[in-house]
Amino acid sequence: IYTPQITQQTRPLSISERGHWRVDMSSFAEETKARFWAFLEEIVGKGQVGWGVWCVLEEEGGGLEGEGEEEGKEGEGKEKGGKKLIAKILCWGEIVGEIWNVLFIGLHRQVVGTGVCWVDAEGKVVVRMK
């Protein structure tokens, strides 16, 4: 992982653990969302980022364990109906850094400053980026 971008890491990652990068896309422009999702479909769908990597797009209403008070403010980054649009990119612990780079490239650096985090299989935030 590009360490200057890390704001929090609660523990070392195991190479064989599963988790996902969680990207809140609610604040992105519609064009950015569509372009980013098409990028993920292309590289993940064709297996260009390795086996065992896939992505899902979900609406989410609640928070995560370990999520700060700042992110829980009413109305911030939410879609209509109070739901957030979340892209989850599932991967192994050993390629967390590489997938971060994919996000960085796919969002043309717009991912910086959005509070993207890597969440383990228990739903706990392990790595939080700027």
Image (cartoon, rainbow, N blue to C red):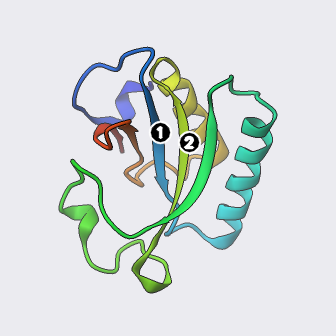
Q: Are marks 2 and 1 in contact (CB under 8 Å)?
A: yes
Q: What's the mark number on residue 20?
A: 1
* Quadrant location of the C terminus in the rendered image: top left
The quadrant holding residue 62 is: bottom left
The residue that appears at 47% across and 39% down in the rendered structure is 20
**Does 44 sit left or right of 100 as displayed?**
right
User: How many residues crowd mark 2 within 10 Å: few (<14), some (14–19), many (20+)?
Assistant: many
The residue that appears at 38% across and 36% down in the rendered structure is 121
Amino acid bearing label 2: Ile
The residue that appears at 36% across and 30% down in the rendered structure is 4
Q: Position of residue 60 (x, y in %)?
A: 43, 66
* 130 is higher (above) or lower (below) than 101: below
Calculate the distance from the C-alpha at mark 2 to the C-alpha at mark 1.
5 Å
Amino acid bearing label 1: His
Towards the viewer: 100 or 110: 100
Q: Position of residue 49 (x, y in %)?
A: 69, 27
* 81 is higher (above) or lower (below) than 99: below
Q: Find disc 2 in the rendering and name its residue.
A: 89
How many numbered tags mark residues here?
Answer: 2
Q: What's the mark number on residue 122?
A: none
Q: Where is residue 33 in the image (x, y as percent from the top left)?
A: 65, 63
